[in-house]
Amino acid sequence: MNWLWTSSDLLAAMNGRPVGNLPEGISGISIDSRSIGKGEAFFAIKGDRVDGHDYAGIALANGAAVLVVSEGKLPALGRLNAPMIVVDDVLEAMIRLGCAARDRSAAKIIAVTGSVGKTTTKEMLRHVLQPQGRVHASVASFNNHWGVPLTLARMPEATDFGVFEIGMNHPGEIRPLTAMVRPHVAIVTSIAAAHLGNFESLDQIAEAKAEIFEGVVNGGHALIIHDSPQYKLLEDAAAAAGVSHIHSFGANPKAEFRLVEFSGGAEGSILWAGIGGRTLEVAIGAPGRHIAENAVAVLAAVKLAGGDLDYAASALATMQAETGRGRRHTLSIGGGTLKLIDESYNANPSSMRAAISLLRDSEPPVGGRRVAVLGDMLEMGEHAAEVHAALARPLIEAGITDVWLAGPLMAHLRDALPPEVSVIYRESVEDLKAYALAAVAPGDVVMVKSSKGTGCAKIVQALIESYPETQAEEYGAEGTEAEG
């Protein structure tokens, strides 16, 4: 059996104490008792809302081969007759295991951070590297203090490329995560007004993102977007962190890896990228200039990590978006069809503008409408009123005349829009969901965009459940980080 970890290696890495007859090894690691697979280890993490120890019995019933539990919780688990590894603290033990996984790996490691585009860039990297070797990458947005060590601990020893997303809500959060990941290539995709409630300026956000460079291995690479006003700050931070090779990407003529030209449409785009002295013509199965910019970063990272550039460029044509990050659906309604663009995973002012541009470029048939369904952008702090009202300008410039809004913060946008824009406003997402189900019509192109915490994904789900899907088109218009 090709174990992810043998039990002896688990015990050694985590400084654990065995209880009962441990299996020879485990096939995987889970922190969710509901979705754990047979033969996996269940790590009973104590979170902000729930304690995994309370679900240990369910994990066993669902096939867990061994429980990783805290010494202090052991008396309460006495009724369970199961193999266990007892540790001082489960999260700390998982961190130690993640570090052990990194120590034993010969993989090329790429880490991605940024205010906008992290997850899409990570998924692009996964997609283009898969034809070139064994790839291990973060699932969903596992980019925080438990998501990163969990992803590391799950990395098989025989991995060729590891791709990690690293996020943050506050200063100092990236530093310990990049120290675990120790990337060969560290990418900063962009700096934008995300989590403004926790920072005083974009420069402060950039300084927090720049912590990623502190973990870069000797001889490694920093890859920074040159189009950002914070480029020099990031470049200086990479140099101060001792990064050997500092590179830039973007449309700026000074960028080392350059977006030379871009031709976009509603169904996809073509870019010309200057990479390593070559100009590549690259088709992307996703619309949006922001996607093209991230694709240049992906191609650059592949080259810096020793991958095959031509394979990567070819693979971008079949890139698919994740749910909530630009996935398109064609729904049957009233003898016609409705185009639904699902951008409900998350939002900040920058990603809102990108999504509005996608809606602008999506041409409805005669009689159809472009409808922007927008929910609150969270974590904007004292800037909330200003940044929501400021969305009026890109909507007007894009010619969007039908805007449906939900949430207390979107009232600021409602008040900023001119009379010629048809505005529907509801205080709650549930009320707007009911309106949307009744108001959509054949020919409409409907884009739903919000922060994840607003629950606007319920509008997307309700539309899909109410109107049969004829096809799903996978495009990317990525938002920003979720829980960091």
Image (cartoon, rainbow, N blue to C red):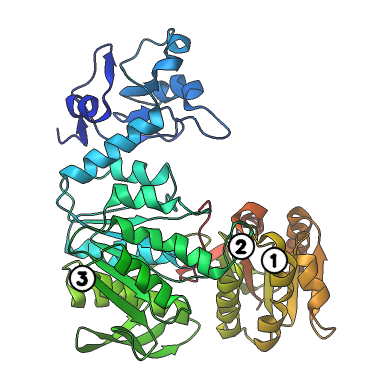
Q: Foreground residue, 171 or 432?
A: 171
- Disc 2 + disc 1, Cβ < 8 Å: yes
Work out whether mark 2 precedes mark 1 in sequence or the reverse, and give the earlier one: 2
Identify residue type, mark 1: His
Image quadrant of residue 137? Answer: bottom left
Q: Is residue 296 left or right of residue 119?
A: left
Q: Which mark is residue 383?
A: 1
Q: Which residue is mark 2?
A: 196
- Drawn side of residue 355 relative to residue 60, left or right: right
Are the residues at dot 3 and dot 2 in contact (C-beta closer than 8 Å)?
no
1 or 3: mark nearer the eye? 1
- Judged from this view, the residue extending furthest toward the right is 419
Which residue corresponds to the image point at 70% horizontal and 83% vertical from the top-left?
A: 393
Secondary structure found at label 2: helix
Q: Position of residue 191 (x, y in %)?
A: 49, 70
Residue type beneath disc 3: Leu
Q: SS class of the residue under badge 3?
A: helix
437 vs 215, nearest the viewer? 215
* Mark 1 crowdedness (10 Å alpha carbons): few <14, some 14-19, many ≥20: few
Q: Secondary structure at mark 1?
A: helix
